[in-house]
Amino acid sequence: MLFGLQQQRSGSGSSSGSGGGGGSSSTGNILHGNTFMCSVCCKSFLSGWELRRHLHAHADARPFHCPYCSHRSNFKHNLKSHIRSIHPGQPFTFTVQTQAADDA
């Protein structure tokens, strides 16, 4: 389950980029003091995609399954770190379980 996005305007009105043109930069960051705030922990982000990625940390879904034990992770890189530290010498392989498969 993912939570909704909240966009807030910080009132500064000044550009945070060196170009000074305003709007959106080529990396997707929103300039002119716009921020996106997590409705769960109130952490703020400069772009909506960063917030959407962050919201996975609050979600119950853990689609990445370790093939060597019962560990499940919400991010692929967390599973990779788990396999390297808990199962050294084992190849990095994993399965992804979709939400529909979890509900069945």
Image: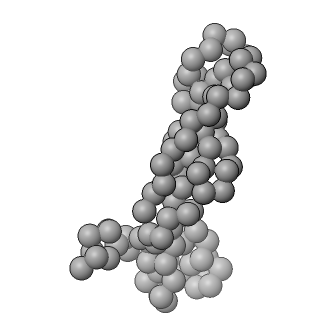
Q: Residue at x 57, y 17 (%)?
A: 23
Task: State the image quarter where residue 47 is shown.
Answer: top right
Q: Left or right: 11 with respect to 99? A: right
Decide which of 56, 35 is in the foreground and name it.
35
Residue 73 at x, y = what percent? 51, 73
In which quadrant of the rendered image does the C terminus lie?
Answer: bottom left
Q: Left or right: 72 with respect to 36? A: left
68 w.r.t. 94: above or below: below
In which quadrant of the rendered image does the N terminus lie?
Answer: bottom left
Q: Residue at x 63, y 10 (%)?
A: 21
Q: Residue at x 67, y 20 (%)?
A: 32
Q: Residue at x 64, y 23 (%)?
A: 31
Q: Left or right: 99 with respect to 43? A: left
2 w.r.t. 21: above or below: below
Residue 77 at x, y = what percent? 56, 64
Q: Left or right: 71 with respect to 18? A: left
Residue 76 at x, y = what percent? 50, 65
Residue 79 at x, y = what percent? 54, 72
